[in-house]
C-alpha cells in the first residue's frame, strides 16, 4: 500500500512505465516524446530509462507514426503512439480508419493490432483550434476501434495499462486541461478498480443522471454538489468507454432517475450524446420523464481562446441542462 | 570452372528462367480468366489487372526469401500468386467465398495471407507504405534479418505517405525495399501530368536512399536488380528504392474506358511483352531450340489452364461466409482486457 497524491499526467507516465517494465514489447513512438518528454511531459524520463529503441522520437509525420505502429503491432509489438494535440491526429486519419481499424477483420483474426494511440483532447487551456478539439466521435464511429477517455489520476494510471494490454487498437483520450489535477490513490495496488470498458458511477443520485467523460467529469461532480445544496440529487456517471458503449450502466441509471443529461465538449451535432440519446430512448422510452438533454460544444470551429469559456460546458450550462430535464 | 560446375550453373539458370516464365504465364492467364469472370458477373466489386506488368511481380517477389514480408497494392494478384499464395484461395477470394485468403471479405483488392507474410493488397494508394516501415522497424529492433518489400505505383509516389515512409526508412536505417511499379499512369493521369519531376528514381535518391531504375518489362533485369538490392539491404541495413518501368496493357480497372491512352502507345509497349521476350531469350541464349520452346510453352499453358479451371470450380462450389458471422473479428473476442495489470 502506497497512498500517494499524483497528478493525472504523472499517473499516465507511471502507468506506461509499469507496462514497459512488464513487457519488453511495449514501445512508445511520437513527436518529441524522448529527449523532451513530450509537449505535456507525459513521457518524461522514459527514454532515459528505457532507451531510444523503446521510446522513439519520430519526425512530424502522424500518418507515418501510426502506420509504423501498425507494422510493429503485426510483428508482436505493443506500440503506444503519442499524437501531440487532438487536431494533429487528422493527418493519420487514413491509417487509423483504413488500416488500424480493419486489419484484424481483413486477416480473419490471423493478426492482431494491439496498439494505443494517445491523444490529449479538449479545450480550456487557452489554445486555439487544432489544439483544443474533441475528435472522439470520428473514431467511435469506426468499427474495429476501441475508444476510451480517462478523467482522473487513478483511472489514468490504470486505464493506460489496460489499454496497452488490450489486444485491440485503443484510441486513448487524455483530458489535457486536467493533466495537473491531483488525487490520492494506492499506487502499489495490484488490481484495477474496474475494467477498461466499464462506466463508473462517480456519485449516486436519484433525480437526474448526468453523464460525461474526460475533462467535463470534474465539472459534473461540482454541478452535482451545487445542485445538492438546492435539494436535487444528481447521479454522475463517468462514461470512460466511448466504444464499446457501456449502455447497460446508463440504462439502469436512467430507469431509476427517469432523466438523462449528457455532457461533452465536442460539438453536439452527431456527437457521442446523440448516439447515447438514441439508444437510451430506444431502451427507456416508458421510463423517461423528459427528453435526453445534450450539453455540448456549439457547431462551430473551436473558438478563439478568449471566447472558449462560452463554448465549453461549464457549471452553469450543466446545471441549466439539469433544470431543463427537471422542468418536464 | 569445371565442366560439372558449368553444367550446374547452366541448370540453375535454366531452372530460374523456367520458373520466371511459368509464373508469368500463370499470372497472365489468371488475370484473363478474372476478366472473363468479371464480365460474366461472377466476380463483383472492382478488378484491377496486372497484364503487362507480370515481370515486376515475378521478378521482385521471386527474389525474396519466404521470411521476407510483402506489402502490396490493389493490383496485387500477381504479387500474391508469385508469393505462393495458392491460386485456389485467391480465386475463392475473387468469388467472395469463405475459403478465400481473406475469407471472402477482401475481394480482389485485399488479398491477405499472414502465414506467408503477405500483408495485403490495399485499396488505399500508399496506405501500406508506413506499415512496411513498421514491419521493418520491428525486424530491426528484434535483430531479424528479414527485408520488407513494399510494392506501389507511380500514383503512390505523389501521396504524402510515400514521402513520410521514405524519410522514416532512410532516417532510421530500416530494411525496406521500395518497389515503385511505374506503369506511367495514375489511373487515367499520365506521369507528366501527376509529377512535376518525372524522374522518380532521382527523387527517391534525394531521401538518402540507394535508388535504381530498371526495365520492368525484362523479367531477368528485374530479378537481377532485386537480387542486388536485397543483398545491399541485408548487408547494410539500409532501405533501397527500385523504380520498375513497366506498362499495363489493359485499362486501370474493368470500369475504365481507357480514353487517355493512345492505341499506338499501347501497341508499342506490347512489343515489349515480357512473356514472349523471355521465351525468345531461351532460344537466343542457346538454351533451347525454337521447337523445344514451343512444345514447352504448350505444356505450361495446358498445366496452367488445368490449375485455373480447378481453382474456378473449387471457388464456385465454396460457401459464402454466413452473414451473421460478419460481426466476427471486428475486434478480438477477448472483450474487456484483464483487470489485473501488475
Image: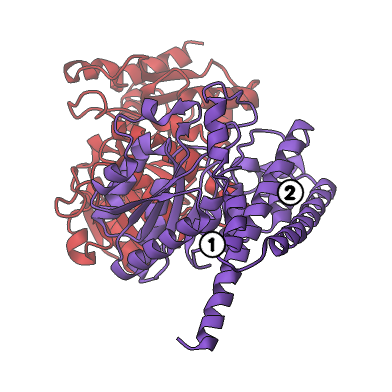
Chain colours: A red, B purple
At x 21%, y 50%, the residue is A33
- Mark 2 or mark 1, which is nearer to you? 1
Residue B162 vs A225, above or below: the answer is: below
Q: Which quadrant holds residue A83? A: top left
Residue A48 position within the rendered picture, expressed as x and y whole percent measured from the top left:
17, 63
Disc 2 on helix, strand or loop? helix
The residue lying toward the viewer, choosing from A123 and A328, is A123
Disc 1 on helix, strand or loop? loop
Q: Which quadrant holds residue B35? A: top right
Residue B90 position within the rendered picture, expressed as x and y whole percent measured from the top left:
68, 51
Q: Is residue B305 visible?
A: yes
Position of the C terminus of chain B by quadrant: bottom left
Q: Which residue is mark 2?
A: B92
Q: Which residue is mark 1?
A: B62
Chain letter of disc 2 in the image: B
Residue A20 position within the rendered picture, expressed as x and y whole percent measured from the top left:
32, 63
Residue B270 vs A220, above or below: the answer is: below
Amino acid at each position: 500500500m502506497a497512498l500517494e497524491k499524483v497528478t493525472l499526467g504523472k499517473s499516465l507516465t507511471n502507468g506506461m512505465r509499469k507496462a514497459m517494465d512488464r513487457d519488453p514489447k511495449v514501445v512508445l513512438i511520437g513527436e518529441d516524446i524522448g529527449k523532451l518528454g513530450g509537449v505535456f511531459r507525459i513521457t518524461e524520463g522514459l527514454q532515459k530509462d528505457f532507451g531510444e529503441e523503446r521510446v522513439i522520437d519520430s519526425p512530424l509525420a502522424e500518418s507515418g507514426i501510426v502506420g509504423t505502429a501498425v507494422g510493429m503491432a503485426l510483428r508482436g509489438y505493443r506500440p503506444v503512439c503519442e499524437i501531440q494535440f487532438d487536431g494533429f491526429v487528422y493527418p493519420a486519419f487514413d491509417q487509423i480508419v483504413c488500416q488500424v481499424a480493419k486489419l484484424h477483420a481483413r486477416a480473419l483474426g490471423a493478426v492482431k493490432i494491439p496498439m494505443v494511440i494517445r491523444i490529449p483532447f479538449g479545450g480550456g487551456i487557452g489554445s486555439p483550434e487544432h489544439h483544443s478539439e474533441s475528435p472522439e466521435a470520428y473514431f467511435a464511429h469506426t468499427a474495429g476501434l476501441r475508444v476510451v477517455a480517462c478523467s482522473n489520476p487513478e483511472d489514468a494510471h490504470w486505464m493506460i495499462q489496460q489499454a496497452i494490454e488490450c489486444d485491440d487498437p485503443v484510441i486513448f483520450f487524455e483530458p489535457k486541461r486536467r493533466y495537473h489535477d491531483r488525487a490520492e490513490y494506492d499506487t502499489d495496488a495490484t488490481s484495477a478498480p474496474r475494467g477498461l470498458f466499464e462506466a463508473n458511477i462517480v456519485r449516486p443520485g436519484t433525480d437526474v443522471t448526468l453523464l460525461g467523460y474526460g475533462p467535463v467529469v470534474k465539472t459534473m461532480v461540482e454541478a452535482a454538489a451545487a445542485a445538492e445544496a438546492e435539494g436535487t440529487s444528481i447521479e454522475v456517471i463517468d462514461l470512460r468507454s466511448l466504444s464499446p458503449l457501456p449502455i447497460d450502466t446508463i440504462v439502469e441509471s436512467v430507469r431509476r432517475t427517469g432523466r438523462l443529461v449528457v455532457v461533452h465538449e465536442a460539438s453536439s451535432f452527431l456527437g457521442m450524446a446523440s448516439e447515447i440519446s438514441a439508444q437510451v430512448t430506444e431502451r427507456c422510452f416508458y421510463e423517461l420523464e423528459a427528453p435526453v438533454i445534450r450539453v455540448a460544444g456549439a457547431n462551430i470551429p473551436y473558438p478563439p481562446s478568449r471566447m472558449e469559456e462560452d463554448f465549453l460546458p461549464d457549471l452553469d450550462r450543466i446545471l441549466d441542462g439539469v433544470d431543463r430535464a427537471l422542468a418536464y | 570452372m569445371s565442366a560439372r560446375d558449368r553444367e550446374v550453373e547452366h541448370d540453375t539458370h535454366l531452372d530460374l528462367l523456367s520458373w520466371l516464365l511459368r509464373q508469368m504465364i500463370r499470372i497472365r492467364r489468371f488475370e484473363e480468366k478474372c476478366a472473363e469472370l468479371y464480365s460474366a458477373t461472377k466476380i463483383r466489386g472492382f478488378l484491377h489487372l496486372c497484364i503487362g506488368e507480370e515481370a515486376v511481380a515475378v521478378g521482385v517477389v521471386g527474389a525474396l526469401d519466404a521470411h521476407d514480408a510483402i506489402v502490396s497494392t490493389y493490383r496485387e494478384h500477381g504479387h500474391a500468386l508469385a508469393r505462393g499464395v495458392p491460386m485456389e484461395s485467391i480465386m475463392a477470394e475473387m468469388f467472395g467465398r469463405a475459403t478465400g485468403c481473406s475469407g471472402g471479405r477482401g475481394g480482389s483488392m485485399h488479398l491477405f495471407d499472414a502465414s506467408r507474410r503477405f500483408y495485403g493488397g490495399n485499396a488505399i494508394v500508399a496506405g501500406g507504405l508506413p506499415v512496411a516501415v513498421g514491419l521493418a522497424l520491428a525486424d530491426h529492433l528484434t535483430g531479424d534479418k528479414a527485408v520488407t518489400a513494399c510494392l506501389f505505383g507511380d500514383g503512390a509516389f505523389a501521396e504524402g505517405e510515400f514521402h513520410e515512409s521514405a524519410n522514416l526508412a532512410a532516417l532510421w536505417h530500416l530494411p525496406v525495399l521500395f518497389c515503385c511499379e511505374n506503369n506511367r499512369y495514375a489511373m487515367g493521369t499520365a506521369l507528366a501530368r501527376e509529377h512535376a519531376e518525372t524522374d522518380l528514381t532521382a527523387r527517391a535518391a534525394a531521401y538518402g536512399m540507394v535508388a535504381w531504375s530498371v526495365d520492368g518489362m525484362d523479367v531477368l533485369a528485374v530479378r537481377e536488380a532485386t537480387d542486388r538490392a536485397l543483398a545491399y539491404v541485408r548487408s547494410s541495413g539500409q532501405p533501397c528504392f527500385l523504380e520498375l518501368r513497366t506498362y499495363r496493357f489493359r485499362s486501370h480497372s474493368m470500369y475504365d474506358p481507357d480514353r487517355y491512352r493512345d492505341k499506338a502507345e499501347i501497341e508499342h509497349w506490347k512489343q515489349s511483352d515480357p512473356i514472349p521476350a523471355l521465351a525468345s531469350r531461351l532460344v537466343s541464349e542457346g538454351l533451347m531450340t525454337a521447337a523445344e520452346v514451343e512444345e514447352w510453352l504448350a505444356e505450361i499453358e495446358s498445366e496452367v489452364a488445368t490449375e485455373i479451371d480447378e481453382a474456378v470450380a473449387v471457388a464456385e462450389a465454396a460457401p459464402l461466409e454466413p452473414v451473421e458471422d460478419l460481426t466476427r473479428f471486428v475486434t478480438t473476442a477477448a472483450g474487456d482486457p484483464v483487470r489485473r495489470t501488475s
